[in-house]
Image: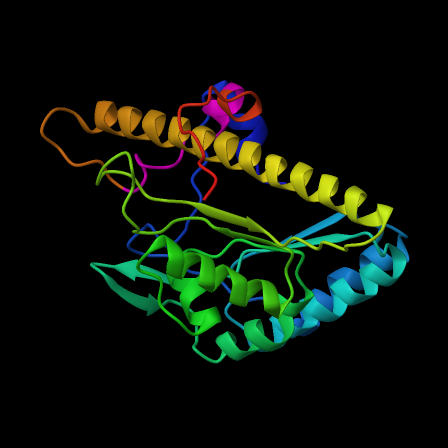
Amino acid sequence: MSPRSPLSPHGQWCPVCDSGYDHWKGQVMTAGELQTLYEGLRLNDVTRYDYVLTGYTRDTSFLEKVMEIIQELRRQNPKLVYVCDPVMGDKRNGDGYMYVPEILLPVYKEKVVPLADIITPNQYEAEILAGRKMNTEKEAIEVMDVLHEMGPDTVVITSSDLPSRLGGNYLVTLGSQRKVIHCGSSVSVEREAQNQIALEIIHIACEKTVSALQHIVTRTIANAKALAGPGKSPSPAQLELRVIQSKQQIENPEIIINATII
């Protein structure tokens, strides 16, 4: 557990060295080291989980080992939900770029995404996974359809530069839930109800998540500007996200961004 959680509410600044800073050092965990950690969990019989979330990694063998472990965890709990954030790259000044080795892309496409229940790529990551561009809502839906065909039932494109109805200062988030409809029996009615519920859940989840994020970013920017002083640009340290300070907005966010079904 990060020390930021218990200490930040008491006014203690807990720096975390990430890529927002000019300098950062450390080691990349290997597949063997991950296996050792997992063996410890297994020996203590704490390997039954309801959810698994994965994010940034830059080593192919490590990523493949994670997939092996998830499959083993699923044998213990077939209902386990795997949420994958395929952190690989982003757009800068309109151009996409990868900040992990390109050799990770085929691993994500062939081994990771097919195993995931939910994936949360940004626009660039969704495009390179699907192998096609998205410049319109229609193309975005087509990209999400391709990603569904790869395996995940739920696809959330966390940020895109598609035109926003709110203006040019807004990013667009898109979510899609794959529908499975069986006709000609009572099962179809049940499935249709489940599909509608799933769609409503995504609708509400998107509104709450994006609204909470907007609250965090607004607080962070205001705090950073106050720390930097008039006329000065905030430093990376001053721009550390004010997550703990936004605890109330995360737990019960005021909805300030509304989702639209397309």
Q: Is residue 238 magenta?
A: yes
Q: Where is residue 156? Give x, y as percent.
A: 51, 50
Q: Main secondary structure of the magenta part?
A: loop
- In the depicted structure, whether residue 261 falls above or below residue 29: above
Please name the residue shown 43% across and 63% down the image: 125
Q: Can I make out residue 63 in this image?
A: yes
Is 43 displayed left or right of 65 in the figure? right
**Residue lying farthest to the front in this orientation:** 184
- In the depicted structure, whether residue 27 falls above or below residue 22: below
Q: Where is residue 82? Give x, y as percent.
A: 69, 55
Q: Is residue 146 magenta?
A: no
Between 75 and 40, the one lying in front of the other is 75
Between 105 and 198, the one lying in front of the other is 198
Between 211 and 92, the one lying in front of the other is 211
Please name the residue shown 84% across and 54% down the image: 47
Q: Can I make out residue 87 in this image?
A: no
Quarter occupied by residue 31: bottom right
Q: How many marks?
A: 0
Quarter occupied by residue 147: bottom right
- Locate the N terminus and report the quarter of the image it occupies: top right
Quarter occupied by residue 101: bottom left
Between 115 and 177, the one lying in front of the other is 177
Q: How is the image coloured?
A: rainbow
Please name the residue shown 60% across and 68% down the image: 149
- In the depicted structure, whether residue 199 falls above or below residue 140: above
Q: Which residues are magenta?
A: 236-248
Please name the residue shown 33% across and 27% down the image: 218
- In the depicted structure, whether residue 22 falls above or below residue 60: above
- Locate the C terminus and report the quarter of the image it occupies: top left
Q: Where is residue 214? Give x, y as percent.
A: 38, 31
Q: Where is residue 134? Give x, y as percent.
A: 35, 62
